[in-house]
């Protein structure tokens, strides 16, 4: 049923329809509305049987999910930013144990400096943990991906992160088609664990594995991600057949077939990018875009196929590989394997900085004219940076950068009166 | 696409206003997107919320930079920030105040904008009368409907009642209706406040 | 503790005493068809108090739960020596996740059991002092606060033994560890505030808290059996000497455990909902020196010369316990 609702609510309702059995929650902006809605849905009997457990930290949240998943219950939690880092040990533990936990990440920047707004640094920090990572472009996709995630996770015995941009998606009201319980049941069968903690059939799970077998265990998790490259598009098609829309899959192209310039990005910024692509197309520019949904596994072949005919690629990257460039950009670059298109990295949106149509348009046109640096920080306040360097050259400063920048902003004020 | 930017202070229901507007537009068969400016809001701090309405799916994710309509829930913000930044030259302005633009001393600054597209509304007074709380958002939405015609009053009222259950919804809907009527009356006599 | 009119004390073997008890009070270990949950072949050190304590505790839990048991183990000696991949000593459903999260993982297992309608399943979380009093404290407190249906058992050997005998918040005052070496003006562990997890557990007012020792294995079994059938959060803290870490002879494990009890340094008691309900009175009080001398981790208190001040401070701690827990006969 078509509803005008908040993204978080849409996700909560999709998770509810997926019949989770244990939900554990620790609140962190911007995921709070999801877990609040789920606590309501459990309390008023919409999800039965289900246990909702309020835990004392994110580390506990994922740990509870590990226990319940190992005992055969479909388990869910959600977090972001600092919370994801706090549970980092458990993140690796869950994938190492092959537990099909689904977790929402309300993408948010990681401090210091503390920042509650959107970028991709949090999920990126766990990109090599062995979890599957899917990015939603819209709230519809965010809702749909959770349903697909449970299916994917349980098929592969691999946990899945569904990433959605904090605030931009989580707190936005828009139209979402919430499926029926029947549709979800047709798509998602009950959880049948491969190995489970059962007193009647006891086994030891989680033993130490030495040098003689560890490599093999890791190879198998690598192999799971490779297999996911097939399963993700297959589930996307199956989902379309039951629910009647295209959600998920490895990636989506937009007007890229004859494009000379192709823009690549993860998540909600693709909407704005597509608007700019349309404007530029109208003016005769051969430009298109690729919205990447599956970040892990990284669809190397599909990306290469989508980009190889272009002259240049612009990656709009909400994650900074400090000292190197962009995290997404680096992965895209390696997929191209020195192939034809030249790649421009545009670091944008960090800490929730607006990515405007105007700025994107400007940067795409510059790329076309090959006037763009290899790595650009979109809308960087050059003046502020310059003044900081001047001050730094005059006296050795140490300490928090943000607080030091304030001196440029407040120095003048301090001189008045 | 019709873009609305709401300005107000935390606690005045600015975010809810945008959400209700999006609900109303949805009920009218439109696509709508509503989201807040995501500041670290606390009661009293300036906040913004945005609503886009269009007949096709809305893909844009940036804040509303070029609003077609400004809804200002708190007149004290006029002194503090340039609320009119980016407002379309034929844009609408809805200001929560029992005074006229002239009385507020800003008639001159608004010369650039069409006179029949701006109006002040005593939304807080209406809210106090019907809802017994100084939450001007519902009244302003009723006024919005009258001023712009972008959404019909019946959908605004239905959206208000969906958002606020029971008697609270009815009271807010009443405030909205009164504001709507007020604006229509005032439009028959231009440059008069909707009172 | 059960109401028996005759007390049986260990004289060398329990055989005589056990035979004279009623069936339901006989040691689990005397049953030929006991679950043997921690089977032989594990890699624990000779004389390991933890292996002994765990075997008794889990077999008792298995009997009391009609073998409907799942155990979640924190990282530590017990986990490492019991599961040298690809072998496992455990004959029960067993999960090891991380160092600090055993309590939380157990909460999840218990929730799953409820959701699946398997309410008879009993869940144990177990770990050493490191995983319990330090890194696991957050999750432990959360589990207590929610009154999750988990029995947490801490095997306290008073240091991070698995990683090479480093100091934990359970390390007693004055003890030498690799990170509180016996050098400098104040050798050995600080004389700090101490951290009594049983008292912290009692502060959470959970249904059952108990301390136990491998010195009195029957008492240990009975406490576990009692705890298993209670619903809600429960905590048992077991004192388990570590010959390697304590620098004691492997044949002195039980003797040292008994001395810890008889000096008053390790009080044995039970509590329910924050109130002490029973205690083991000290039959023959021993001076702390008798306990400290056989352990090389306290050698610096005696050589090159007797540190009368610190020994006296340790004695005060013991006397304080005796007063506080009313351990005097």
Image (tube, rainbow, N blue to C red):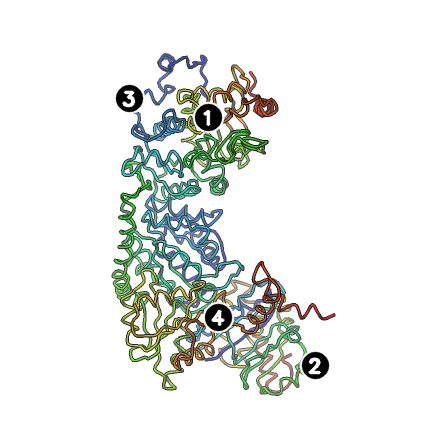
Residue B49 x %, y %: 53, 70
- Residues at marks 2 and 4, CA–CA distance in whole angstroms: 32 Å
Sequence order check, earlier mark of 2 and 4 = 4
Callout 4 environment at 10 Å: few (<14), some (14 to 19), or many (20+)?
many
Q: Are marks 1 and 4 on the same chain?
A: no
Q: From the image, state whether disc 2 or disc 4 is nearer to you.
A: 4
Residue for badge 3: C32
- Residues at marks 1 and 2, CA–CA distance in whole angstroms: 82 Å
Q: Foreground residue, C255 or C120?
A: C255
Residue B161 x %, y %: 51, 67
Residue C126 x %, y %: 41, 35
Q: Are marks 2 and 3 in contact (CB under 8 Å)?
A: no
Residue for badge 4: B34
Q: In the image, which disc is placed on residue B103?
A: 2
Residue for badge 1: C212
Chain letter for mark 3: C
> With respect to residue A161, does A197 lie above or below?
above
Residue reaching furthest right? A417
Q: From the image, state whether disc 2 or disc 3 is nearer to you.
A: 3
Q: Are marks 1 and 4 in contact (CB under 8 Å)?
A: no
| Location of residue C128 by image quarter | top left
Residue in the image at 29% along x and 37% along y: A202
- Residues at marks 1 and 4, CA–CA distance in whole angstroms: 61 Å
> Callout 1: helix, strand or loop?
strand
Q: From the image, state whether disc 3 or disc 4 is nearer to you.
A: 3
Sequence order check, earlier mark of 3 and 1 = 3
> With respect to residue B84, does C227 lie above or below?
above
Q: Are marks 2 and 4 on the same chain?
A: yes
């Amino acid at each position: 049923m078509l509803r005008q609702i908040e993204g978080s609510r849409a996700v909560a309702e999709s998770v509810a329809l997926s019949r989770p059995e244990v939900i554990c929650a620790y609140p962190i902006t911007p995921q709070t509305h999801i877990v609040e809605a789920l606590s309501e849905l459990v309390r008023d009997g919409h999800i039965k049987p289900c246990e909702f457990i309020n835990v004392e930290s994110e580390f506990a949240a994922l740990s509870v999910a590990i226990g319940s998943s190992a005992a055969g219950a479909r388990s869910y939690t959600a977090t972001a930013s600092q919370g994801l880092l706090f549970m980092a040990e458990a993140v690796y533990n869950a994938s190492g144990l092959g537990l099909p936990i689904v977790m929402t990440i309300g993408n948010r920047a990681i401090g210091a400096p503390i920042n509650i707004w959107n970028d991709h640094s949090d999920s990126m920090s766990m990109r090599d943990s062995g979890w599957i990572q899917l990015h939603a472009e819209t709230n519809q996709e965010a809702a749909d991906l959770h349903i697909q995630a449970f299916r994917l996770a349980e098929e592969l015995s691999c946990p899945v992160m569904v990433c959605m941009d904090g605030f931009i998606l989580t707190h936005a009201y828009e139209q979402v088609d919430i499926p029926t319980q029947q549709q979800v049941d047709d798509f998602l069968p009950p959880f049948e664990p491969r190995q489970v903690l059962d007193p009647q059939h006891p086994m030891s799970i989680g033993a130490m594995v030495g040098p003689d077998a560890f490599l093999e265990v890791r190879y198998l998790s690598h192999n799971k991600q490779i297999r996911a490259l097939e399963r993700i598009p297959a589930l996307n098609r199956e989902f379309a057949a039951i629910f009647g829309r295209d959600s998920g899959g490895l990636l989506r192209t937009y007007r890229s077939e004859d494009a000379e310039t192709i823009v690549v990005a993860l998540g909600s910024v693709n909407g704005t990018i597509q608007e700019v692509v349309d404007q530029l197309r109208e003016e005769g520019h051969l430009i298109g875009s690729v919205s990447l949904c599956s970040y892990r596994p990284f669809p190397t072949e599909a990306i290469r196929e989508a980009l190889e005919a272009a002259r240049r690629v612009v990656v709009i990257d909400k994650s900074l590989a400090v000292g190197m460039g962009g995290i997404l950009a680096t992965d895209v670059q390696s997929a191209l394997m020195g192939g034809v298109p030249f790649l421009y990295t545009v670091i944008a949106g960090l800490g929730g900085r607006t990515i405007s149509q105007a700025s994107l348009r400007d940067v795409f046109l510059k790329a076309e004219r090959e006037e763009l640096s290899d790595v650009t920080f979109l809308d960087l306040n050059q003046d502020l940076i310059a003044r900081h360097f001047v001050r730094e050259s005059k006296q050795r400063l140490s300490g928090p950068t943000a607080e030091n920048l304030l001196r440029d902003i407040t120095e003048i004020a301090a001189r008045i009166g | 696409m019709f873009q609305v930017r709401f300005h107000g202070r935390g606690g005045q229901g600015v975010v809810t206003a945008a959400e209700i507007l999006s609900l109303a537009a949805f009920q009218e068969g439109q696509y709508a997107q509503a989201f807040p400016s995501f500041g670290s809001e606390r009661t009293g701090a300036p906040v913004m919320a945005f609503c886009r309405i269009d007949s096709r799916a809305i893909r844009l994710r940036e804040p509303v930079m070029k609003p077609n309509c400004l809804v200002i829930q708190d007149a004290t913000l006029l002194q503090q920030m340039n609320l009119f930044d980016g407002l379309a030259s034929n844009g609408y302005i809805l200001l929560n105040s029992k005074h006229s633009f002239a009385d507020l001393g800003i008639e001159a600054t608004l010369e650039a904008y069409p006179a029949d597209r701006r109006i002040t509304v005593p939304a807080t007074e209406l809210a106090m009368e019907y809802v017994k709380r100084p939450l001007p958002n519902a009244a302003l939405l009723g006024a919005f409907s009258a001023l712009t015609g972008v959404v019909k009053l019946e959908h605004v009222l239905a959206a208000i009642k969906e958002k606020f259950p029971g008697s609270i919804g009815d009271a807010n809907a009443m405030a909205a209706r009164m504001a709507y009527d007020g604006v229509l009356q005032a439009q028959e006599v231009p440059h008069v406040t909707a009172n | 503790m059960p109401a028996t009119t005759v007390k049986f004390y260990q004289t060398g073997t329990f055989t005589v005493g056990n035979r004279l008890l009623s069936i339901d009070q006989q040691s689990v270990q005397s049953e030929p068809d006991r679950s043997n949950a921690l089977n032989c072949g594990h890699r624990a050190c000779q004389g390991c108090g933890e292996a002994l304590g765990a075997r008794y505790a889990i077999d008792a839990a298995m009997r009391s739960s009609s073998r409907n048991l799942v155990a979640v183990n924190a990282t530590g000696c017990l986990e490492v020596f019991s599961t040298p991949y690809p072998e496992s000593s455990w004959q029960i459903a067993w999960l090891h996740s991380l160092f600090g999260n055993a309590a939380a993982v157990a909460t999840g297992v218990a929730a799953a059991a409820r959701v699946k309608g398997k309410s008879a399943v009993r869940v144990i979380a177990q770990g050493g002092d490191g995983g319990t009093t330090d890194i696991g404290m957050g999750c432990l407190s959360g589990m207590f606060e929610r009154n999750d249906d988990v029995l947490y058992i801490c095997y306290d050997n008073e240091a991070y033994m698995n990683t090479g005998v480093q100091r934990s918040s359970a390390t007693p005052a004055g003890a030498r560890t690799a990170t509180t070496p016996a050098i400098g003006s104040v050798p050995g562990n600080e004389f700090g505030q101490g951290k009594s997890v049983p008292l912290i557990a009692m502060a959470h007012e959970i249904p059952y808290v108990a301390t136990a020792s491998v010195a009195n294995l029957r008492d240990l079994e009975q406490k576990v059996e009692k705890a298993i059938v209670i619903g809600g959060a429960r905590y048992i803290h077991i004192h388990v000497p570590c010959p390697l870490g304590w620098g004691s002879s492997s044949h002195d494990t039980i003797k040292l455990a008994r001395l810890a009890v008889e000096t008053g340094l390790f009080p044995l008691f039970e509590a329910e909902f924050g109130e002490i309900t029973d205690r083991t009175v000290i039959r023959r009080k021993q001076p702390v020196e008798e306990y400290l001398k056989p352990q090389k981790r306290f050698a610096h208190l005696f050589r090159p010369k007797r540190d009368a001040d610190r020994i006296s401070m340790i004695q005060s701690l013991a006397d304080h316990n005796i007063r506080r827990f009313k351990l005097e006969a």
